[in-house]
Image (tube, grey):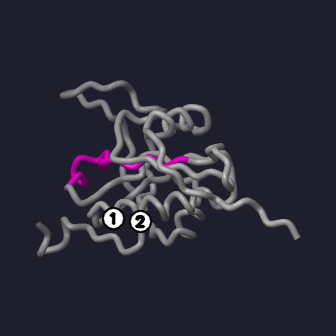
């Protein structure tokens, strides 16, 4: 019986992660900034088969200093790469002192990898356009104008709801 190569975690620069996103992501472009980025490779090789980019929450009301967001997760289809990256991103965030890690998926994305990594669905959020009469912005792509599913890493704590929060 032949064993499939094991996924290996690697630190990766934002530049490298963004290049992977640019080449492989179905509907998102690279991000402007991040707290950290991770990659997975197959076996001992250097070929990246997936990346996770983690940064401050995009929604301002969630940017409480305790919460991070997986702003991009992208793979080339390697089995279990998404779950490995989601799990590793949470471990890294906790090691840095963060108490909550979130991400969003489109409604047509089922969330199997998130569930496999122990994440839980919080509910539907957002939708609409970024631009407002008081602050015009480049138009929101059509596929992002609809509500998205908000997910939270296992054991994460929303410090905004905790009476003992700093």
Q: Which mark is residue 95?
A: 1
* Residue 111 falls inside the magenta stretch: no
Give percent across and percent down for residue 60. Answer: 23, 47
Q: Which mark is residue 52?
A: none
Label 1 packing within 10 angstroms: few (<14), some (14-19), many (20+): few
Q: Is residue 48 above or below residue 82?
A: above
The quadrant in which residue 123 appears is: bottom left
Q: Most extreme residue toward the right, as rendered?
A: 1
Q: Residue at x 14, y 69 (%)?
A: 165
Identify the residue under disc 2.
91
Label 2 packing within 10 angstroms: few (<14), some (14-19), many (20+): some
* Residue 54 falls inside the magenta stretch: yes
Q: Which residues are magenta?
A: 51-64
Give percent across and percent down for residue 18. Answer: 49, 35
Q: Most extreme residue toward the front, as rendered?
A: 44
Mark 2 and 1 residues: CB-CB less than 8 Å, in contact? yes
């Amino acid at each position: 019986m032949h064993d499939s190569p094991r996924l290996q975690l690697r630190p990766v620069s934002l530049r490298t992660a963004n290049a992977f996103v640019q080449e492989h992501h179905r509907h998102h472009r690279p991000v402007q900034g991040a707290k950290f980025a991770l990659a997975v490779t197959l076996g001992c090789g250097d070929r990246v088969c997936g990346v996770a980019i983690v940064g401050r929450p995009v929604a301002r009301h969630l940017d409480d200093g305790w919460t991070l967001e997986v702003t991009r997760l992208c793979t080339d289809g390697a089995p279990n790469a998404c779950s490995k990256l989601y799990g590793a991103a949470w471990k890294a965030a906790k090691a840095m002192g963060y108490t909550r890690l979130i991400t969003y998926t489109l409604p047509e994305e089922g969330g199997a990898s998130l569930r496999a990594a122990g994440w839980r669905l919080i509910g539907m959020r957002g939708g609409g356009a970024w631009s407002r009469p008081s602050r015009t912005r480049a138009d929101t792509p059509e596929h992002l104008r609809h509500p998205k599913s908000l997910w939270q890493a296992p054991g994460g704590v929303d410090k905004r709801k905790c009476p003992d929060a700093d």
